[in-house]
Image (cartoon, coloured by chain):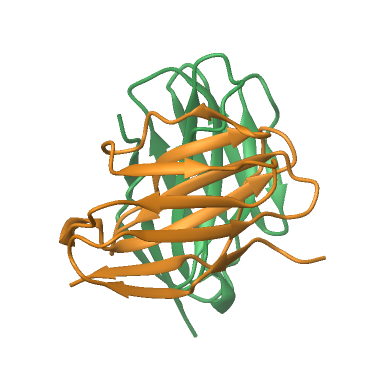
Amino acid sequence: GAGVSQTPSNKVTEKGKYVELRCDPISGHTALYWYRQSLGQGPEFLIYFQGTGAADDSGLPNDRFFAVRPEGSVSTLKIQRTERGDSAVYLCASSLTVGAQFFGPGTRLTVL
Amino acid sequence: QQPVQSPQAVILREGEDAVINCSSSKALYSVHWYRQKHGEAPVFLMILLKGGEQMRHEKISASFNEKKQQSSLYLTASQLSYSGTYFCGTAHGSGNTGKLIFGQGTTLQVKP
């Protein structure tokens, strides 16, 4: 079956612009997670959803970051007024319940 | 707090064994192990739950010492395909959480 997919695979934007990153989880997975990973570091937790609701958003760094999952499947991570420090690989993962998380290939965000 | 992994890097010859440790300063509910190859997404290896048994995936096994708040990953008779960066992700509290806090990673290189 299909794994987690993320689009776009690469995104280059200018400082101050708005970006949206999309995640399609594995079909039937109720939990969806967003992480970001900087070079040489482990993934850093941002937010996770159970169904449509955000179960834990304690990792969102500030109010420029927002994520939605309106129908309990696809999720979008939205970043407003991007800053150079937002540059990273944004990883999405999904799981059947709260358990083994299966990661997508990531979106590499570069803020110039 | 981020779990601490040791060692930071290991170089092995094919067929040799290695141990990677993951220690937390907070009480653990579960530990997840992942392997990530350069430019790819982390791949799930196994989960160890509080009170659970030692787990095994092919020639890789792991243990969970609740008292020491530590997990160890054992790679036996290493193969070239084992090369990559290994991350532990820890879950805390009651366990009904998808939030994982990842260590900084251990880079493993297996040489012929």
Viewer-proximal residue, A104 or B52?
A104
What is the x, y in percent for residue B98? 56, 32
Q: Quadrant of residue B54?
A: top right
Q: Is residue B23 left or right of residue A38?
A: right
Give the quadrant of the C terminus of chain A: bottom left
Q: Is residue B83 left or right of residue B3?
A: right
Q: Which chain is green?
A: B
What is the x, y in percent for residue B80? 55, 78
Viewer-proximal residue, B81 or B87?
B87
Give the quadrant of the N terminus of chain A: bottom right
Q: Residue at x 54, y 47 (%)?
A: B33
Q: Colour of chain A?
A: orange
What is the x, y in percent for residue A74? 64, 52
Viewer-proximal residue, A14 or A37?
A14
- Residue that protrudes farthest toward the bottom in the picture: B112
What is the x, y in percent for residue B24? 37, 28
Looking at the rendered structure, the number of numbered marks drawn on it comes to 0
Viewer-proximal residue, B7 or A39?
A39
Rendered position, B27 above or below A76: above
Rendered position, A6 above or below B105: below
Q: Residue at x 72, y 34 (%)?
A: A97
Q: Residue at x 67, y 36 (%)?
A: A99
Q: Residue at x 32, y 49 (%)?
A: B104
Q: Quadrant of residue A95?
A: top right
Rendered position, B14 above or below A42: below
